[in-house]
Amino acid sequence: MLLSRLARRSLRQATLAARCIQRHTAVGFNAAAPPSTTPTRWSSSGSEAERASPVKVETVSVGEDDSRIRIERTKADQTTERRTLQLGDVQPKEFFNHETHLEVLWNDNHRSIHPWKWLNCWFPRGFSEELRIDEYVFKPAWLINSIADKVDYRLGVEQIMADLTKNIWVHGFCLVENAEPTPEATKAFLEKIGPIRNTHYGGFYDFVPDLALADTAYTNIALPAHTDTTYFTEPAGLQAFHCLEHEAPPDHNPDEPLGGESLLVDGFQVARTLKRESPGLFDVLREAKIPWHASGNKGIAITPNHTYPVIEVDRESNKIYRIRWNNDDRGVVHLFDSKRWYEAARKWNEIIRRESSQYWFKLTPGTIVIFDNWRVMHGRSAFKGNRRMCGAYIPRDDFVSRYRETNFEHDRVIAQNLNQCASHGSSVLRRMPPSLRRKAIP
């Protein structure tokens, strides 16, 4: 009896999902498309005639008497080269309770399997923990410098990738030790995380302080803490640096340091500190949108798709997910926001410069630092002599994929990918019209 009630409850929830799909994708229907003839169910192993059929049908949602829907997956129309979406008439005919899943027999005699764990996660507060990939965990790694995570380059690739990506996910950065101090080996290692991102600076970078490009990175001056590529709609995900060599100038006193220490600052920690100490100023940097740009090189004028704030907060979870901070890339603050914004920026910078916010270390040949550019700001002290650096950007989506695939079982990753919306069920309900909301709650 309990299983039957749960089955009916699951079907009501699935019906609601079908309604939402129908409602929110209706604008994408091809109204001009001719009505479907007798469709053939999609099958990769079907006959030549079936594979040649212009319409392939796949049931992806369920319905009850008052809401019947089937979404048909079609191949591109050979005449218009457009995809069409037709609505069919399908409803559950009978269902069977099993220990691990619900089996549904449809009125066209198709049988579908729906695991209970999958169905349950669509109920309010029913998102299965077994399907949840660990969310970002805030751990301020900079409070004690000695806890900086490191991995050994000489370990097996899969173990390195698992430890490396997890350290970056949790702490925001990781040091790779005992690496081969060559650009070729560094590039090959970074490509094991994900594809290197090309920008107007190229892909993999290998440079000395010669101002070959109009960027302060190509100098020997000190650089304050900042994030890179603020001027892209999607800033670089990971950034890596490897110091291949640092030669002292001919007249250098060996008792004096050469400089060039690297600086990391946890932008999420800075934002949390700002919110705790000055909530109003935190709101300013979260809400005031700034024009970011890259205009220093001839023929280059890059800006994002629109203006962005310094602190970006996810609207669903209300969690900080990205920091944009580089005064050299910042455009003009809007006149009506300027006084309050500069007050907030001054407080933000003061927190960044606190000793408790900063993690200083010296990069030497054989050590690669890789950090989350959406979270961690980086900088350096001024240096003497000639220093050769190499490194690259890696897209964030590829980093997240590598982290999940090396730290969790593949099936669990796929299950989470397919059920991402389930964890936001309560927010979806809040946005629904009252009539649908009443039906959504069992």
Image (spheres, rainbow, N blue to C red):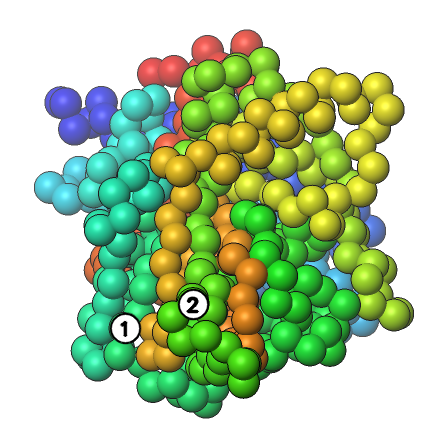
Report which residue position mark 2 lands on.
256
Q: Which mark is residue 177?
A: 1
Who's the residue at 73% across and 78% down the image? 212
Residue 419 in picture, x, y percent from top left: 37, 43
Who's the residue at 66% across and 34% down the image? 309
What quarter of the picture does the C terminus occupy?
top left
Depicted 388 relative to depicted 306: above or below: below
Task: Of the two numbered discs 1 and 2 on the same chain, state the one appearing first in sequence.
Answer: 1
Q: Nearer the viewer, residue 293 or 418?
A: 293
Who's the residue at 47% across and 64% down the image? 259
Who's the residue at 66% across and 70% down the image? 218
Q: Note whether residue 41 is visible.
A: no
Residue 119 in picture, x, y percent from top left: 30, 36
Depicted 144 relative to depicted 257: above or below: above
SS class, disc 2: loop
Q: Is residue 219 left or right of residue 103?
A: right
Depicted 164 relative to depicted 248: above or below: above
- The amino acid type, in three-letter code, at marker 1 is Glu
- The amino acid type, in three-letter code, at marker 2 is Glu
Q: Is residue 246 left or right of residue 143?
A: right
Depicted 118 relative to depicted 260: above or below: above
Q: Nearer the viewer, residue 364 or 88?
A: 364
